[in-house]
Amino acid sequence: MSISTVWSVDVGKSSLKAVKIHRDQTSLEIVAVDKIDFEGGDVGIDSIGQAKAALRTFASRNTIDCPVAVLHPSRSAFSRFIQLPPVDPKKLEEMIGYEAQQQIPFPIEEVIWDHHVSESDDGSMEKEVGIFAVRREAISDFMLDYDEFPLELISIGYIGLLNYVLFDLRPNKPVVVLDMGSDHTDLLIVDGKRFWFRSLPSAGKDFTQALQEKFKLDYNQAEELKTEGAKSEHGAKIFQVMQPLIRDLVNEINRSIGFYKSQAGEVKFEDLFLFGNGSKLLGLKNSLTEHLKFRVHVAKGFHRLRVNRDANVALLQRDFPAFASCVGAGIQALGDGDCEVNLLPQEQQEALEFKKKQKTVIFAAASIYLLIGWMMFSYGAKVKSADAVLSQTAVVDQLKASEKEINKITGNRTADAANAAAELLVPVAQRLEPFDAWTVTQEIFASFDNGFTSPDPEIPKNALEDGKGMLTAAQELANDGKWWLTSVDIERAWFGPNNQKPGKKEARDLELHPAYLVTLTGVRYRFESVVKDTDQVRDLIWNRVKAHVMDRFGDDYPDELITLSITAGVSTTIYSAHPELKEGQKKSKITGDDVQEQGSLFEFVVSWVQPIVATVEAPSNEEGDKDE
């Protein structure tokens, strides 16, 4: 039993970030946002005490009425990526366990670890396995701060970042992701189904300390100068102080990318995404663009997640890059994350799973008892009456009638369950409709073979005498009637009683039916004539499409929902005879001479409306029908 709402909490060295995410059937929505900044300073600051105080403040001003996912700091986690050869799935877990004991530099009983398996993108059977571990003692101390919270998940900072990137950004090519916080900088490479992580030595606090020492500032002043320096008249001097640190950061990024390429092969990177409060660093984006030659992006909003208007939208917009890992942990807890690494101790995970199953069992048992009680209440009196007059013939008829009524009720419940199951299949059938349209396209074009007859080509007499022109003629016969499918477009559309196709807003207002508009574009080569076979081509294609839609959607499918247009043929030479075959021959439209035209190309466009299946017929209650 999965959860539908979760609080995700990320406690860093300088602030607490939290988001509350709700999942409905179609999307994820952020319904609440909170951020608590710690008091700044570089001397005598009790970050652990401030974190505990921030958690108490967070709990006091928010309602914790759902499971909680938390992020363990990346700097305290161990990670290792290994390649495993093809192996029986039943033995894969055993092999991973063995590798974990070899790779983790601590006794296996002293750590809490988990793994993630990535399939190879190159089609090989090898699997890349990421192993992640944290000392059991560190996890126990970490969980003490969350005693009052119903923990569902303990993820790692860069795992949360990975799940956010894969869910919301969905990169379709290799990208570099940099999450720069106050006390850490995580570099993440996302390469298709593979990913790789490294913790870099530079962090936001290093830039703050450099500004403090140079300009004799306190921590808060240096923090403000670090991000707001561009507005200062001394912006150039500020950047000059930070430039050596940025250069070191660029070198570390280059070194990390080079190492990944040495392991994964030649990979081309063009984009880098910046997250964390460090993304606001003066001059960082421009420096990375200049030295790495990448397109550098600073995230400013979500692509797939929705934000409820009652959430703290202003806070999220101001500090959006700092919330990426936190949001990713919530995505994972709701079951929508690609990487499911969970460092919550196994005993706690089992206890949570037991509670979820226990609720399901209790609910099912309660439903059964209610049903039994209802049956006893409804039929108890009839049974007692039957016992009292069992010897009478009328009682037998009454019992049969009761039995028939019970069967009828049971049959109705079976039918209700079948109808409910059928309703669940409706979204599946709707999603398969584009695939059905593509299958129809293949069937239509497969049937075009030998669909037309071609006239015998005109063969010059000298070609008949020496046989050289016969090869050209035979080739033209082979070319005649060829078809090429150049594009297939399947898009969502709407149609109503008048078969109109309005825009989205008008469709909602008119409450029209959803459908798919299928458009095929193709070319046919035809020997000899430009206009002669246009009508024949039109009728043949249109009739094939019409036969499909009538078979699929019934004889009352409107003809006007099928359209066909044919561009006038363009004269062309699709085959030219070999120069040796043209020797001694005079110009002829069979031999393929440059000045002669041999045939025509017809371009055609055919489209039809593919209605989305709205319902799936439920099985009938045969027993109930018989009783009727």
Image (spheres, rainbow, N blue to C red):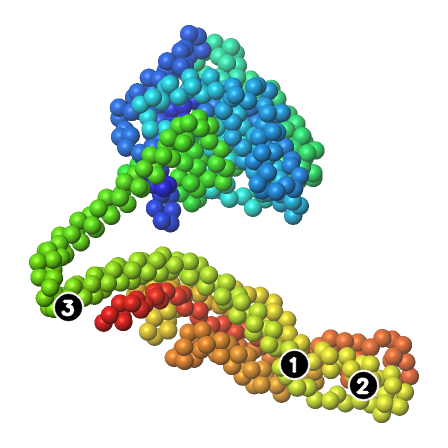
- Residue lying at 65% horizontally and 81% vertically, measured from the top left: 450
Specify few, some or many for label 2: CA neighbours under 10 Å numbering under 14, 14-19, or 20 or more: some
In this view, which residue lies farthest toward the bottom? 461
Along the line of sight, the residue nearer the viewer: 557 or 284: 557
Q: Which mark is residue 450?
A: 1
Q: Residue 38: x and y, percent?
A: 37, 18
> Which residue position is annotated with label 3?
397
- Residue lying at 59% horizontally and 38% vertically, measured from the top left: 91
Residue contact between numbered discs 1 and 3, judged by CB atoms under 8 Å = no
In this view, which residue lies farthest toward the front? 391
Q: Residue 26: x and y, percent?
A: 38, 49
Q: Residue 574: x and y, percent?
A: 73, 75
Residue contact between numbered discs 2 and 3, judged by CB atoms under 8 Å = no
Specify few, some or many for label 1: CA neighbours under 10 Å numbering under 14, 14-19, or 20 or more: few
> Is residue 49 visible from the viewing direction of this image?
yes
Q: Earlier in the sequence, mark 2 or mark 3?
A: 3
Q: Which mark is residue 496?
A: none
Q: Earlier in the sequence, mark 2 or mark 1?
A: 1
Question: In the rendered structure, which amino acid carries the disc numbered 3?
Answer: Asp
Q: Which mark is residue 588?
A: 2
254 relative to 44 in the view: left or right: right
Q: Residue 132: x and y, percent?
A: 54, 28
Residue 116 in the image: above or below residue 185: below
- Residue lying at 52% horizontally and 70% vertically, measured from the top left: 440
- Residue lying at 62% horizontally and 40% vertically, measured from the top left: 127
